[in-house]
Image: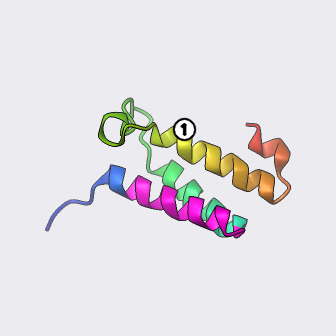
Amino acid sequence: MRKPDANGRVMGERMMGAAKHFLGDQISARRHLEYALTLFEPTDHGRGVARFATDSWVIVRVFYASSLFGVGSDSQSRG
């Protein structure tokens, strides 16, 4: 059995979170994005930059902040 690709899982959760955010389902978006953030290791330096040409951690944090803002948690979204 093949081991799951951690970067692929992060990207999948990020995409689900972004889709839910754009559909207006901020609570579901937050769940996906929070889960994506838990998948990052503290020692993750590359964070998939070379593989996907983006910094997934930054993108997840941007959508997470936006989803928090969307439900009125603007003070948390700035953190």
Q: Is residue 28 magenta?
A: no
Q: Where is residue 18 drawn, in percent x and y? A: 58, 59
Q: Badge 1: how crowded within 10 Å, few (<14), some, or many (20+)? A: few
Indicate whether 33 appears above or below 55.
below
Task: Answer with left or right where residue 54 lies relative to residue 3.
Answer: right
**Would residue 18 be found to the left or right of residue 52 on screen?**
right
Q: Which residues are magenta?
A: 9-25
The residue singled out by tag 1 in the image is 58
| SS category of the residue bearing label 1 | helix
Most foreground residue, 24 or 13: 24
Q: Quadrant of residue 27?
A: bottom right
Residue 23 lies in the magenta stretch: yes
* Above-or-below relation of 40 to 11: above
For image coordinates 72% across by 68% down, the residue present is: 24
Q: Above or below — where is 12 with respect to 41? A: below
Specify the quadrant of the image occupied by residue 58.
Answer: top right
Direction from residue 19 to residue 53 in the image, left or right = left
Position in image of residue 57 (x %, y %)? 50, 40
Q: Residue at x 36, y 40 (%)?
A: 48
Secondary structure predominantly adopted by residues drawn in magenta: helix
Q: Residue at x 73, y 37 (%)?
A: 79
Q: Quadrant of the N terminus?
A: bottom left
Q: Position of residue 17 (x, y in %)?
A: 57, 61
> Which residue is at a point 60% across and 43% down the rendered structure image?
61
Kind of residue indicated by mark 1? Val
